[in-house]
């Protein structure tokens, strides 16, 4: 079977998931099996087939598994969001369509993606500008102590960090492609630690330092972790020097300690992580209420879950509705998944993400030029770190942060930006596999 036919076959489970998921919601709500679920499944399959036909025409040699994996995650996300809010699910479906459109535009416009190298500094400064937008008066808005996005009343709301992460990876891949050899050859060992030459590593430190400073100013520590981890991943792939990563991790540890002890918003997150069941923290505004209830929800799910639609998300009879699990369609959607589908359902979601990331790194291995290798590795690493940050926060591996679970959480910026990320990976894959 050809690669493109395998891709087409892989879209069937996603459409079946949409059909079965909506059928389950209708049965749970009204005890009636509606034909509407079949309609939704057919529409979703039609959109995915349209995307497949576009890939078949424009990227005939691209990886055949990435797009079906994304379709599977997106279909699951729409069903889970619909189970929580029908209005949000309709918007999520619209963003999915917009994401497909922007995916096609990205493939057409950046057909020769290597031209992005010529604009690396422009891309870097535009990305920095995007990070500053949430702090601008009148359009920036704050949620839970962090400046997360831009709101233009009556027009749109978006999170610029979702797009800035792609720009920074493009800059790093381009810059390190030119300097990786001199960074290794000119490195010096000080007290047993390999230090790269400052004149070549300095621009990376300066631009990335400005970006990290802006993120600290925004109090968006989840994105900071994602960006910093992406830097270390690309740096390691470019230089093959583990010592650079170790030094970076030590620096991050010192920075995390300082932020956790000196910035109130971050300190509250750390305290809620360490002591979620402390009664004083639980009752405090911005305390451990969200983390503790996430623990309760996951514990209630057990191994196989309470059943689809059975999680208790709101306080019964409350007016207005009060959430037992705050932000269930965004920050806490993984807790809802484990509550209703159990540990097995949560692990299945994580395995799907791991498969996508593995295909991304496989693309990096197949790439025939350094820029393509670094770009694919960086995009895959940032995507993986975003999943780790939100799942790790919900499961108390790390303090909870406010990033989205890619393609599953409610949010248009995340879906659209990650479709651009997918387009770039498939462009790299098509070029790499065509050369083999």
Image: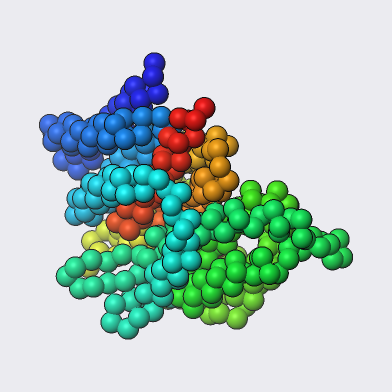
Looking at the picture, tell me which residue is in the foreground, 269 or 5. Answer: 5
Task: Please give the name of the residue rendered at 77% of the width and 61% of the height, measured from the top-left corner.
Answer: 187
Q: Quadrant of residue 320?
A: bottom left
Display colour scheme:
rainbow
x and y percentages locating residue 131 in the rendered image? 42, 71
Residue positioned most to the left: 35
Name the quadrant containing residue 332: bottom left
The furthest residue to the top:
1
Percent x, y for residue 265?
Answer: 50, 76
Q: Can residue 315 be seen in this view?
A: yes
Regarding residue 165, the answer to whether it shows in the image is no
**In the rendered image of this protein, does residue 66 appear above or below residue 312?**
above
Residue 91, percent from left and from top: 21, 54
From the viewer's perspective, is residue 360 above or below residue 291?
above
* Quarter containing the N terminus: top left
Residue at 33 percent of width and 58 percent of height? 413
């Amino acid at each position: 079977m050809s690669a493109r036919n395998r891709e087409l076959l892989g879209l069937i489970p996603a459409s079946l998931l949409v059909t079965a998921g909506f059928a389950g919601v209708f049965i749970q709500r009204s005890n009636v099996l509606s034909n509407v679920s079949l309609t939704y499944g057919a529409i979703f399959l039609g959109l995915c087939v349209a995307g497949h036909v576009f890939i078949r025409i424009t990227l005939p040699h691209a990886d055949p598994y990435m797009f079906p994996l994304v379709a599977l995650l997106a279909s699951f996300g729409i069903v889970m969001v619909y189970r929580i809010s029908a209005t949000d699910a309709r918007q999520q479906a619209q963003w999915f369509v917009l994401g497909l459109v922007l995916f096609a535009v990205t493939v057409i416009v950046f057909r020769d993606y290597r031209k992005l190298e010529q604009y690396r500094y422009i891309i870097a400064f535009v990305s920095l500008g995007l990070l500053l937008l949430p702090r601008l008066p009148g359009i920036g808005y704050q949620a839970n102590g962090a400046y997360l996005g831009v709101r233009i009343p009556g027009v749109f709301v978006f999170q610029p960090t979702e797009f800035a992460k792609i720009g920074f990876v493009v800059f790093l891949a381009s810059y390190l492609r030119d300097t990786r050899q001199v960074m290794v050859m000119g490195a010096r060992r000080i007290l047993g630690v390999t230090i790269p030459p400052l004149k070549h590593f300095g621009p990376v430190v300066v631009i990335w330092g400005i970006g990290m400073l802006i993120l600290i100013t925004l109090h968006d520590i989840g994105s900071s972790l994602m960006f910093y981890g992406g830097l270390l991943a690309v740096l390691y792939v470019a230089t093959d020097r583990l010592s650079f990563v170790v030094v970076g991790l030590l620096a991050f540890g010192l920075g995390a300690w300082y932020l956790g002890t000196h910035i109130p918003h971050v300190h509250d997150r750390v305290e809620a992580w360490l002591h979620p069941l402390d009664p004083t923290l639980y009752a405090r505004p911005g305390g451990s209420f969200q983390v503790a209830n996430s623990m309760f929800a996951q514990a209630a799910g057990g191994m196989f879950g309470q059943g689809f639609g059975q999680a208790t998300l709101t306080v019964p009879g409350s007016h207005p509705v009060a959430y037992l699990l705050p932000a269930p369609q965004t920050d806490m959607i993984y807790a809802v998944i484990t509550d209703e589908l159990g540990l097995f359902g949560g692990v299945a979601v994580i395995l799907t993400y791991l498969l996508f990331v593995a295909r991304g790194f496989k693309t990096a291995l197949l790439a025939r030029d350094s820029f393509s290798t670094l770009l694919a590795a960086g995009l895959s690493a940032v995507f993986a770190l975003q999943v780790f940050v939100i799942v790790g926060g919900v499961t108390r591996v790390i303090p909870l942060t406010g990033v989205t679970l890619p393609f599953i959480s409610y949010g248009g910026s995340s879906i659209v930006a990650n479709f651009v990320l997918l387009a770039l990976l498939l462009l790299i894959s098509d070029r790499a596999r065509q050369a083999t």
